[in-house]
Structures are given as C-alpha cells and as structure tokens.
Image: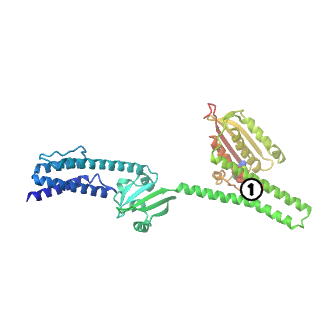
Amino acid sequence: MSGRQRGALLGALALMVLAGAQGWLLRGALDGVAFAAVGALVGALGGALLAHLQEQRAHEDLEAATRALEAFAAGARGERLYLAQEDPRGVASRFNGALARLGEGLAALDLDRARFQAIIENLRSGVVLLDRRRRVQVVNPAAERIFGVWAPEVVETYHLAITHAYALESALDRVERGEVLEIERRENGRVLQIELAPVRGGGGVLLVATDVTEERRLLEVRSQFVANVSHELRTPLTVIGGFAETLLAGNVDEHHVQRFLRHIGDEVKRLTLLVDDLLRLAALESGRERPEHAQVPLLELARAVSERYGETARERGIALEVGGEALSVRSDRDRIEGILISLIDNAVKYTQDGGHIEVQIGRQDGRALLRVEDDGPGIPEEDLPRIFERFYRVDRSRQRATGGSGLGLSIARHLALSIGADLSVESAIGKGSAFTLAIPDMAGPAPA
Ligand SMILES: Nc1ncnc2c1ncn2[C@@H]1O[C@H](COP(=O)(O)OP(=O)(O)O)[C@@H](O)[C@H]1O
Ligand SMILES: [Mg+2]
C-alpha cells in the first residue's frame, strides 16, 4: 500500500469515526443538514491535512488528528491538534480553527434543540411527529395526556397506536402529497381537533391535537340559550301582535277592547321582567361587579322582603311567617336580598291558596342559614337537579298562568356563588319545598 493510499484510508476512517460518534448528537429533523455540513467540513479538512501529511509521510500527525477528531466526536470541545512536523501551510491552525467553529456550531445546535424541546414540552396542544413510514418519532406530554399513551411505549410504532383512527390514513395520504388538513374526531364524549401538516425536507407529518370538548360544550350551551331567549321573547310578542291586529281590524266592542289592552299590558310586563332578568344574568356572568362586604341583618332583611309579598299572601290566604335568630353576616346585602326575593316569590307563586310559608334564620357550622320552606306542590325528584338551570321550569303549562321567566333560580344560584354561599333545595312531591341558603359568616376582616 502506498503512503498516499494509506493516508486516504486513514482519512476516511477518521471521517467514519467522527460520523458514527456524532450520530447521537445529530438525530432529529436537523440531522441531515448538520451531518452533511460536518461531513463536508471534515472532508475538506481531511483533504488539506492529507496533502500535508502525505508530503511529510507523517504517520504520527495523522494519528494525532484522528485522536483530536475522536475526542471532539466524544464531546471534548477544547481539543487541539499539534503537529510533530514542520507546518509551513498552517494546517494545524486551520484544523483547530475549523474544529472550534464546528464546536460553536454544534453548541448553537444544542441550544436550539433545548429551546425546541422546552417549547414542545410545554405546549398545551398535543404534538406528534410521524416519519415517512408514519411511525411516531416525537410525542409531547400534552399528546400523552390527550391520547392516553406513554411516549416510550409508542415511539417508533405505527401511528395507530396513538390515534386509533383508521380514518386518518386517507388524510395522511393527502398530507403527504403536500396538503394541510384539519379534522375533527369525536370519541368517548370528547371532541379532538387535529391539524395535519407535511414536514418539509425530511418528509413525514406533524400532527397537532387539541381537546376542544369544553369549547364545544360552551358553544352548545350558548346557542341553546339564544334559542331559549328567542322563544321566550317570541311568545309574548305573538300574543301582543295578535291582539293588536284584532283591535286594528275594528268591530270590537268596548268591553273586549279593554280586555285585549289588559292582555297586551300584561305581556309587555312579562317582556320587561324577562329582559331585566336577562340583563341581571349577563351582569352576573361577566363577574365585573364585585360583591360588597357590609353588615347584613338577615332577620330584618327577610322581614322587609316578606312584607312586599304580604298583600298577595293575604289575598290568597297564605300564611307567610318569618322567624329565627337575629343574625348578621358580613356580605353583600343586595345579593342576599335578590336571592330572598327569588325564593319567596316562588314560594308564594307556587304554593296553593291557604298554604304555609316559613322563612327561618339560623346557623350551622359557622355559616348563617336562610331557609324558605313551603307546603306547596313540591318538585319531582327528577327535576330537582335541573331547576337551577336557565329557563328550566317544571310545569310549562302551569307556568303560563304564573308567568315566571324560568330565570329566577339560576340568577339566585349565581348570586349565591358570587358571595361564596351555597343554595340548595329539598322537596317532596305533594309535601312542599325547602330552599336553604348557607352564607359564610365573614365576621373577620373583609377580603380585599
Ligand atoms: N317553591 C317552589 N315550589 C314548587 N316548585 C318550585 C318552587 N320554586 C321553584 N319551583 C320550580 O322551579 C322552576 C324554576 O324556578 P325559577 O327559576 O324561579 O323560574 P320561574 O319562577 O320563573 O318559573 C319553576 O318553574 C317551578 O317549576
Ligand atoms: Mg321564580
């Protein structure tokens, strides 16, 4: 073997050692580029070095260069080459300069990788990277949560191990041809939004999954609400429109004119109440208004609210009584009053003539209790969990006569939540209902 051949062989060997040892550093999307750069650089250096070494036949120096490269490949960044021979062309300093630049390049790459890793790991969306053969390469923690998998178990497996979606195959075909797609999957009551994009250069597909179940549910609730509101507004409007048309057509005797106008007036009142309730609910839900913290004398307040219903109760022979401890709590007077109005209003509205209603103030476990109990019709057990929902009414036909919006209790519960209180109900059909408001007794300093 000539010195030239031997030199070339050793140069190639050095290259291979470097390439092999760099393998661990340079995995991932950036690999190809970095690897090619290292290869080219080392190739060029190797060429220059070889020319020098061949001339000098300095086997030793080639060894030294190989050792320097090996050490570099193993992670030593301070490694430098010193030649035993004369070095008129400055090969050693060029070699060392290139090595230093390579070291800097790799350090920058490491930093990029660490940043990339930090971003991927902290994303709230699930990120899955598939290679050309649709095998999983990267799974971030959010994807582990969303798909219920453990990364070490699914990396290098076919994507179905994660996605379980055969339907995804055709989408992947399209994405691999360059399309960007967004698909939606519904499974086990969850809604997943999955975006698919081709990975440029290396091939493969990037899959970004977001759990949008909660957003979808809120959207659903909102559109349901809008539908309910529209329905509630339409009913009185239809009545008003009907009477107005009849009156306009003429030929109505004075007695009926009066009756129709009264109906129109009633419906307008209903509409106004409904709109007021809606505005109240919107204000509460926005959470903009902060609750007050003042001394609220509960017994006094309960008496004042009951008095407002005194006349209606008397007319219908209902006994409306207020009793209990003269307790005060630090809280929001207006909100407690709003809840009381809603509860007493319902009790008076739904209790049959001659019934009994009792408002009691007491305490339990450091909280003040405000209880409104009636011996009215009661609420069926299956309706109990729903009566605090917006527009929920147990008996829609009866409602027409009593004329509530179905918003009273949902507003009351919002009010209760906003002051840290609990509003609960017990009821038995035919026996009556009892609503209890448990207010935290904030005797201490008011929260900021
Ligand atoms: N004290 C009560 N007795 C019987 N049913 C009641 C009582 N309070 C509430 N309900 C039922 O709960 C429903 C919801 O009440 P609420 O939200 O105040 O709406 P509204 O009073 O406008 O109908 C009522 O429609 C009624 O069916
Ligand atoms: Mg009501």
Q: Residues within 10 Å of mark 1 (few under 14, many from 20)?
A: some
Snapshot quadrant of residue 370: top right
Residue 425 shows in the view = no
Q: Return the x and y of residue 6 as percentages of the image width and height.
A: 11, 57
Q: Position of residue 304 (x, y in %)?
A: 77, 39
Residue 83 placement, left or right of 319: left
* SS class, disc 1: helix
How many numbered discs, if any? Answer: 1
Q: Position of residue 371 (x, y in %)?
A: 70, 41
User: Residue at position x 74%, y 47% from top?
Assistant: 347
Q: Quadrant of the N terminus?
A: bottom left
Residue 411 in the image: state x and y as whole percent: 68, 48
The residue carrying mark 1 has its beta carbon less than 8 Å from ligand 1: yes
Report which residue position mark 1 lands on: 399
For this rendering, which residue is in front, 110 or 146?
A: 110
Above-or-below relation of 401 to 309: below
Q: Quadrant of residue 298?
A: top right
Q: Quadrant of the C terminus?
A: top right
Say left or right for 74 vs 254.
left
Q: Residue at x 16, y 55 (%)?
A: 11
Is residue 81 positioned above or below 228 on the image? above
Which residue is situated farthest in the front direction here?
A: 88
Q: Which residue occupies the foreground of this view, 370 or 246?
A: 246
Between residues 269 and 206, which one lies in front from this camera angle? 206
Kindly tell me whether residue 55 is visible in this rendering: yes
Question: Amino acid under label 1?
Answer: Gln
Position of 330 with respect to 136 (left or right) is: right
Is 167 rendered above or below residue 125? below
